[in-house]
Amino acid sequence: MEILMAFVIGILFMSATYLMLSKSLLRIIIGTGLLSHGAHLLILTMGGLKRGSAPLLGEHAEHYTDPLPQALILTAIVISFGVTAFFLVLAYRSYQELGTDNVEDMKGTEPND
Amino acid sequence: MKKTNNIILESAITLLLFFIVLFSVYIFTAGHYYPGGGFIGGLMTAGAIVLLLITYDIKTVQQILPVNYRIITAIGLLFAIGTSAGALFFDVPFLTHVFTHVDLPVLGDISLHTATLFDLGVYFVVVGVTMTIILTIGEDE
Amino acid sequence: MTNLIILPILIPLLTGAVLICLNKSIMAQRIVAVFSSIAAMTASFFIIKKVHADGVQALNMGSWDAPFGITLVSDMFSALLVFTTNIIAFVCLLYSFKSIGDQREKHYYYPVFFFLLVGVNGAFTTGDIFNLFVFFEVMLMSSYVLLVLGGTKIQLRESIKYLLVNVISSALFVIAVAYLYSVVGTLNMAHISERIDELSGNGMPGIITVIAVMFLIVFGLKGAIFPLFFWMPGSYYAPPAPVLALFGALLTKVGVYSITRTYTLFFYHDQEFTFQLLSILAILSIVVGVIGAIAYWDIKKIVIYNIIVAVGVILYGVSVMSPDSLTGSVYYLVHDMIIKAALFLLVGIMISITGTSNLNHFSGLIRRYPVLAWTFFVAALALAGIPPLSGFVGKLLIVKGGFEEQSFLGAAIVLMSSLLVLFSIMKIFINGFWGQQPADKGEVKAPIKWLLVSPVILVAISALFGINSEAFLPYISQAADTLLNPDIYIKAVLKE
């Protein structure tokens, strides 16, 4: 199972990198989304994968799954949700303002304008 | 803008809206011992409002629900901070919560928990933030 | 009082929430902001007193015992930084009143300002590695908003780059924490330190070294060390002066703090590789920063590149890891936060007078603005480390530590850099303040009295910090002491 997860995470990171290297801003944002998905799956895998146990069942339970990675993922998902939403708004605003979603056209600093 | 005649959506939403909001409240209250809680409840309420936005338009929805979502966010934050900062008055560590069991006549044994109030804050923050984001994108079209 | 150390986080958070409701009235916002800023400053002052008297303070949030819950830890290092942060925030707030403009003030400038403080103070105080990530995100989220607030073209363009870089570094942070968790199975920083200590009987295992380097990349991106500083000159160029001062003084320093914290608490076993790497990168940062500072003729850019130099100097002190050099690093860190804020505010005043940041386009400011000129002069000397100002003591200790540990090249480069930093900043003074006053501008004096208050306060603090360094040194060396002996930190948190 861990091997499979490693492949899934690897593919996610790979696609994320590919998307983030493209010129269109929207693709870049999708890329960051995939990157954070990969990172979240990585936390889950790193906590150890188990089958058929609840996170915590009192002090005397025989089997339980480590609840911490799940809490971490939840937090990380909320954060990446917020950041992605902000990024989308920013991209939309700058598309209106700059008239382009091509990052090639966003080069340069003030003195060179 | 041309008014589209979304008869199916419009009739469905009058019925569905209450169920969605009710269910989100249920999810929110169930959150303490079962899956659910303020975050998912808030998202679901925001989803209901978004459904309204899809059916009608921003102006109509503003008339139906004349609220400033930024203020909702602030109120939620104050709620969450307030309930956690209550611990300061008792000189116990921040975020410490208390709970008690109450026996009510009809409902039976109910546990009352100050963490629910904290969760209520989360609920408001999520509704406020989600709606602010969606309205910011949708506003100037 | 149990909850003392959370107050610098709680007060700004509460203020931010209240200020959202008050966004209609600018005056009310200003009054609330000033009062709560003073309150946060007072609270952090008492934290320093408390830590000095009773040692490291730990607070288990929600009464969940460490290492299971989230713990906030305030040792002298973080207490000093929190105090400095609050001073700078207060001063930047005063500066904002007259310079930031109605539009921004109505569009939630003050709430976001305070949320940024929540993130910075939280990152300095937390004792939990994942909580550090959360506070980083609070800080970054606010910094995105502050950067884009106003919505000019350059701001939007630079915000996108800044956001993208930070989203990627946040993902890397999560990945690094995941690896660390899989190895040590805990998130409490004191507990992690203990577990890594158990793991590394003779030298760190390879995986820990990998994690150490990943953390260096993550925090290095925030702290702008070589070669990860590439985003900074562009992004920091965009926002207005008070925001720039906050960013320059606080955000990069959070990265530096995190590197210092993790490297002295977690990864101190294998000094051969990780510390060598840190020291090489620090030295290269100094070199690149100096080259940038000398090459540019744009006053903002010159000061921005000086941030990179300072980060390099501080991290070089950390990488040497001797009592002297660490004391020097802590001292220099505090000094640099204050003086960078002062310089950015001064640069902001100069730009508001002349309307340009290009040194070739103005000169002779000293005739009309003598106070501004001399404040800038003192700040420049302090930055370069001329005795008796505050930069001197820190650099002296770092260099002394470097020579004692036989790291001659590094120490020599730190020394050389002082000279070149002085040159780069004096370039502004000579070209901008001396020389012919352009005749056509007339004698119109821009009203800068109020704006000058803030940098004058900061420069005065910096001078006091330098001249009176004997009085501050016990506090600084207590901070360095905790960094050198992780046991003090671990014992205070885990209560063994």
Image (spheres, helix red, strand yellow):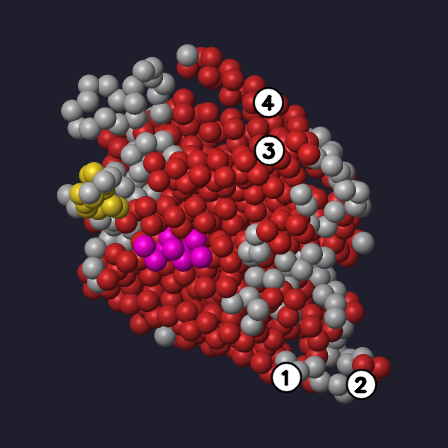
Which residues are drawn in magenta? B75-83
- Which residue is most to the right? C440
Amino acid type shown at disc 2: Gly
- Spot occupied by residue A81 in the image (x, y as percentages of width and height): 53, 38
**CB contact under 8 Å: marks 2 and 3:** no
Asked if badge 2 and badge 1 are on a common chain, one would say yes
Q: Please name the residue that numbered disc 3 is placed on.
A: B12
Q: Is residue A108 shown in magenta?
A: no
Q: Which residue is mark 2?
A: C442
**Which chain is mark 4 on?**
A
Q: Is residue B49 left or right of residue C368?
A: left
**Dot 1 falls on which chain?**
C
SS label for mark 2: loop
Mark 4–mark 2 Cα distance, whole angstroms, equals 61 Å
- Who's the residue at 51% across and 74% down the image? C28
> Do marks 1 and 3 share a subunit?
no
Q: Secondary structure at mark 3?
A: helix
Left of C357 or right of it: where is C194?
left
| One can see residue C252 in this view | no
Name the residue tied to disc 4.
A14
